[in-house]
Amino acid sequence: MTLDGSPILTLAVEAAFVLIMLATSLAVVRLARGPSLPDRVVALDLITVLAVAFCALFAIASDNAAFLDVAIALALVAFLATVALARFAERRKARSEELGGTQVKQRSDAE
């Protein structure tokens, strides 16, 4: 690391790296375990937010502003992915309710 500032800044950045890695590992566990699609979407969104934070911290640690551009681009892509996954989940829910409603109607008509 090329933090030429105070040792407090160096300690804070290193502690933040450790906390981000811990949070990322917990989010990966939530992504793998689920139990539902919305839980997985939120976990994936959290992972992307943590990746943006990691890029910003790395920009501070390396004193290279190019990583901030990477963080901004990643944040924009993550936002679009979250919106797309939310639309997919909403359509999936509406489709299952629609199919469930027709099955209930057919059962009542048969009686």
Image (cartoon, grey):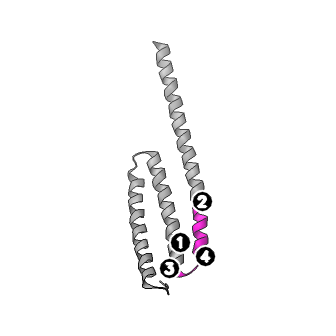
Does label 4 or label 1 sit earlier along the sequence? 1
Name the residue rendered at 49%, 24% in the picture: 103
Camera-side mark, 4 or 1: 1
SS for dot 3: helix
Q: Is residue 58 positioned above or below 32 on the image? A: below
Distance CA(mark 4)–CA(mark 1): 10 Å
Does label 4 or label 3 sit earlier along the sequence? 3
Mark carried by residue 56: 1
Q: Nearer the viewer, residue 36 or 20?
A: 20
Q: Quadrant of the C terminus?
A: top left
Mark carried by residue 61: 3
Q: Which residue is mark 2?
A: 77
Does label 1 or label 2 sit earlier along the sequence? 1
Q: Which residue is mark 4?
A: 66
Distance CA(mark 2)–CA(mark 3): 24 Å
| Residue 64 sits inside the magenta stretch | yes
Camera-side mark, 1 or 2: 1
Does label 2 or label 3 sit earlier along the sequence? 3
80 displayed left or right of 40: right
Q: Are marks 4 and 1 in contact (CB under 8 Å)?
A: no
Q: Is residue 82 positioned above or below 3 on the image? A: above
SS for dot 1: helix
Q: Is residue 108 positioned above or below 51 on the image? A: above
Distance CA(mark 1)–CA(mark 2): 16 Å
Q: Main secondary structure of the magenta part?
A: helix
Distance CA(mark 1)–CA(mark 3): 9 Å
Q: Is residue 71 positioned above or below 111 on the image? A: below
Camera-side mark, 4 or 3: 3
Q: Which residues are magenta?
A: 61-77
SS for dot 4: helix
Does label 1 or label 3 sit earlier along the sequence? 1
